Image (tube, rainbow, N blue to C red):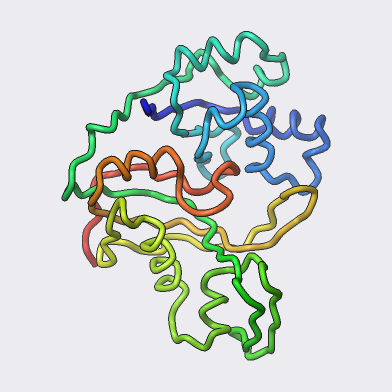
């Protein structure tokens, strides 16, 4: 599959107005709002995975995404059915793209990355244990759980950063190997997201790191697919950078 890196400016104020008019504005989950906006404007899954980058106190942001189509094709697709409200959010004239062909990657290639992720796991069985505060917690089979909390409840000594890097390394394989000495948890917070009419709390983390490509074809697929869960809501996009310094 041909892959393109897409860059597109967005008006945050107009996004919030659009979401509010669609009854998506109460406790706005920007990931859910963008999921709906992009699907309605460009077609289902046309721009996935994606990442919204916003400077502090900015009124606009830049959306990055991987797509099978280039900027001109995406622009024509959007113009065929775009509404004025959608046009107020998305600046189509400034939509740009660069090709990311599969032959860009070779085994042994080192690449830096900036990755926003939601490091959660699904429990194969019910789990009871003590959390960080010492309180007893019981979680049902099939629950979506913070990967760090799952390790703590299993009484496996670890740090949040180590748990998340373990989680990430497992999901990069076999396409790439995570370089632990050149990777770190850059930010962490807990956020509530809206999924299927429910508000779900969970980890929201950014990892800055470096990986080494081991299977170029699988790596191309990984870029197109994204990493982990909630990939269609603003998580899991590998924004590539120069390799990071080792700690």
79 lies above or below 213: above
Quarter of the picture holding the C terminus? bottom left
Q: Is residue 141 left or right of residue 110?
A: right
Q: Is residue 177 left or right of residue 52?
A: left
What percent of the width, then of the height, locates residue 136?
A: 69, 89
Q: Residue at x 29, y 66 (%)?
A: 180
Q: How many marks?
A: 0
Q: Looking at this rendering, what residue extends furthest in the left direction?
A: 108
Q: Residue at x 50, y 54 (%)?
A: 228
Q: Residue at x 54, y 10 (%)?
A: 76
29 lies above or below 69: below
Q: Residue at x 69, y 83 (%)?
A: 137
What percent of the width, then of the height, locates residue 147?
A: 53, 70
What percent of the width, then of the height, locates residue 143?
A: 67, 68
Quarter of the picture holding the N terminus? top left
Q: Is residue 60 left or right of residue 221?
A: right
Q: Looking at this rendering, what residue extends furthest in the front direction?
A: 124
Give the image quarter of residue 3.
top left
Q: Nearer the viewer, residue 220 or 56?
A: 220
What percent of the width, then of the height, locates residue 241?
A: 30, 44
């Amino acid at each position: 599959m041909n892959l393109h890196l897409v860059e597109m400016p967005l008006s945050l104020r107009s996004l919030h107005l659009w979401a509010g008019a669609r009854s998506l504005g109460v406790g706005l989950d920007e990931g859910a709002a963008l999921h709906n906006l992009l699907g309605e404007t460009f077609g289902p899954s046309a721009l996935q995975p994606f990442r919204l980058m916003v400077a502090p106190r900015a009124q606009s942001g830049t959306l990055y995404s991987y797509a099978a189509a280039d900027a001109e094709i995406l622009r024509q697709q959007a113009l065929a059915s775009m509404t004025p409200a959608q046009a107020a959010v998305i600046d189509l004239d400034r939509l740009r793209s660069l090709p990311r062909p599969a032959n860009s990657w070779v085994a042994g290639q080192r690449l830096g990355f900036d990755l926003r992720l939601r490091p959660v796991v699904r429990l194969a069985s019910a789990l009871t244990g003590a959390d960080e505060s010492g309180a007893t917690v019981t979680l049902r089979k099939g629950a979506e759980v913070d990967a760090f909390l799952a390790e703590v409840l299993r009484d496996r000594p670890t740090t949040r950063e180590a748990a998340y890097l373990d989680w990430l390394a497992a999901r990069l394989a076999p396409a790439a190997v995570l370089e632990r000495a050149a990777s770190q948890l850059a930010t962490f917070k807990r956020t509530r997201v809206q999924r299927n009419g429910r508000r779900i709390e969970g980890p929201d983390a950014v990892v800055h790191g470096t990986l080494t490509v081991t299977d170029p074809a699988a790596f191309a697929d990984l870029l197109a697919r994204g990493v982990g869960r909630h990939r269609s809501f603003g998580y899991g996009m590998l924004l590539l950078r120069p390799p990071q310094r080792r700690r």
